[in-house]
């Protein structure tokens, strides 16, 4: 009987050790909830009880790890198990924090409104790590634009239903339809914007899911282009203006073709002034087509007899380009800054750079896009 009891005891201990092996040893550290919302459960089993609901951005202390699961504790000392794929680790969280720190002082090139609930990514790319979930119709500050080759979405389309994809799995499957030996066509591209929300959360999101805030009175003049940003230059008073306000802003706006993956930020600059004779907006200045780069800067500077609105932007100073290893964003190695002054309804070029401005022809635009795509494929 003693031998049987001893055998039973050994089997019980072995089973206990096996269970410990499944769930690992106790760990210290923190993870952060990347899912929209998820429940902690009291056990890892087909039948379990919900302990507490946690939400995107919540910080959790890691108590124990297992296969695909973590035992965690909330700030209120509520403990339970969570899918590992529903959280990010401290290293990824630190990467988002560093991104916010690096771009804390960046100029805001435009403000925008989100079309849908959407995640922020740490780098441009659908497969890049994501964390903060921003709500539809939220206002964001747009800081920087980039383009990246389009990748398969993470499970279900996150831009439409981010709650349906808590995981961040990667697919290594070969793209259907690609045959060995065939020349590769230029990949489809996505535009991305680095944005910052009202809480200071910073990250990259798909450009197709954010609309730049553009006044309706000049939006109607887009003529099939996409207004990247608009900036108030001055204000005029028109007692006969329609509408409740008689103080009308005048704008400089930059526009781009409705295409993704262009190697520049905009190809057109327009100044809209208010006509006191016709009581409407009119185009006082247009520069097109150029290879323009953000940001657009607006100021008021002293001139003879007073002060005047001044705006500036950048164009490429040479054909040489440099690529950011972290984001894949390619920009000219040298920049030229062009400055303009408004004198009434006249727009005059000013400043030290008065050299000719190279205009981009349609065939040059197509060549530039092809070269940019080839350069990105070579870097991969």
Image (cartoon, rainbow, N blue to C red):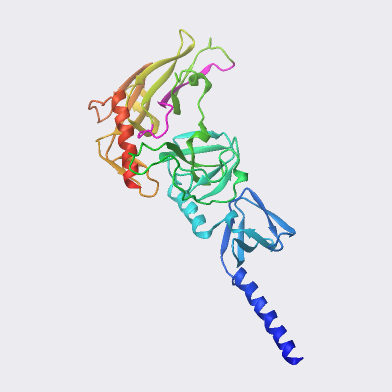
**Residue at 34% from the left image edge and 38% from the top image edge:** 373
Number of numbered callouts drawn: 0
- Above or below, 86 against 294 in this view is below
Residue 230: quarter of image:
top left
Residue positioned 44% across, 35% down in the render: 109
User: Is 248 inside the magenta-drawn segment?
Assistant: yes
Residue 215 image point, x, y percent: 51, 24
Q: Nearer the viewer, residue 336 or 42?
A: 42
Which residue appears farthest toward the bottom when viewing the image? 2
Occupied quadrant, residue 353: top left
Asked if the stretch drawn in magenta spans residue 218, the answer is no
Quadrant for the N terminus in the image:
bottom right
Residue 360 visible? The answer is no
Q: Which residue extends farthest left? A: 355
Q: Nearer the viewer, residue 148 or 179?
A: 179
In this view, the residue farthest toward the top is: 277
* Viewer-nearest residue: 159 or 11: 11
Residue 43 lies left or right of residue 283; in this view the side is right
Seen in the picture, residue 11 relative to 132 is either above or below; the reply is below
Residue 378 in the image: state x and y as whole percent.
31, 45
Residue nearest the viewer, comparing 308 with 29: 29
Q: Residue at x 36, y 44 (%)?
A: 180
- In the rendered image, residue 236, in percent from the top left (x then y), is placed at 47, 18
Where is residue 100? Give x, y as percent: 48, 49
Q: Is residue 56 visible?
A: yes
| Magenta residue span | 244-265
């Amino acid at each position: 009987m003693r031998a049987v009891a001893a055998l039973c005891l050994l089997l019980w201990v072995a089973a206990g050790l096996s269970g410990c092996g499944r769930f690992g040893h106790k760990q210290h550290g923190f993870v952060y909830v990347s899912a929209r919302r998820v429940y902690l459960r009291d056990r890892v089993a087909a039948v379990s009880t919900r302990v507490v609901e946690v939400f995107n951005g919540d910080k959790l202390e890691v108590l124990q790890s297992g296969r695909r699961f973590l035992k965690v504790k909330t700030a209120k000392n509520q403990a339970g198990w969570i899918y590992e794929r529903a959280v990010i680790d401290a290293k990824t969280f630190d990467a988002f924090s560093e991104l916010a720190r690096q771009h804390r002082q960046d100029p805001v090139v435009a403000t925008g409104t989100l079309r849908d609930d959407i995640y922020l990514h740490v780098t441009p790319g659908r497969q890049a790590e994501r964390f903060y979930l921003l709500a539809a119709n939220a206002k964001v500050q747009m800081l920087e634009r980039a383009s990246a080759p389009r990748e398969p979405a993470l499970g279900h389309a996150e831009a439409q239903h981010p709650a349906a994809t808590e995981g961040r799995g990667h697919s290594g499957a070969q793209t259907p339809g690609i045959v060995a030996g065939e020349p590769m066509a230029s990949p489809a591209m996505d535009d991305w914007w680095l944005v910052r929300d009202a809480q200071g959360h910073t990250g990259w999101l798909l450009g197709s899911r954010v609309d730049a805030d553009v006044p309706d009175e000049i939006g109607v003049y887009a003529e099939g282009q996409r207004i990247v940003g608009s900036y108030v230059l001055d204000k005029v008073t028109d007692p006969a203006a329609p509408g409740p306000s008689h103080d009308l802003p005048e704008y400089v706006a930059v526009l781009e073709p409705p295409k993704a993956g262009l190697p520049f930020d905009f190809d057109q600059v327009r100044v809209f002034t208010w006509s006191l004779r016709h009581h409407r907006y009119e185009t006082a200045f247009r520069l097109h087509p150029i290879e323009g780069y953000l940001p657009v800067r607006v100021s008021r500077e002293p001139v003879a007899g007073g002060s005047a609105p001044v705006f500036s932007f950048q164009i490429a100073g040479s054909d040489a380009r440099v690529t950011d290893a972290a984001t894949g964003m390619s920009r000219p190695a040298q920049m030229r800054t062009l400055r303009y002054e408004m004198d009434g309804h006249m727009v005059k070029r000013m400043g030290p750079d008065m050299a000719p401005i190279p205009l981009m022809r349609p065939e040059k635009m197509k060549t530039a896009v092809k070269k940019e795509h080839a350069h990105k494929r070579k870097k991969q």
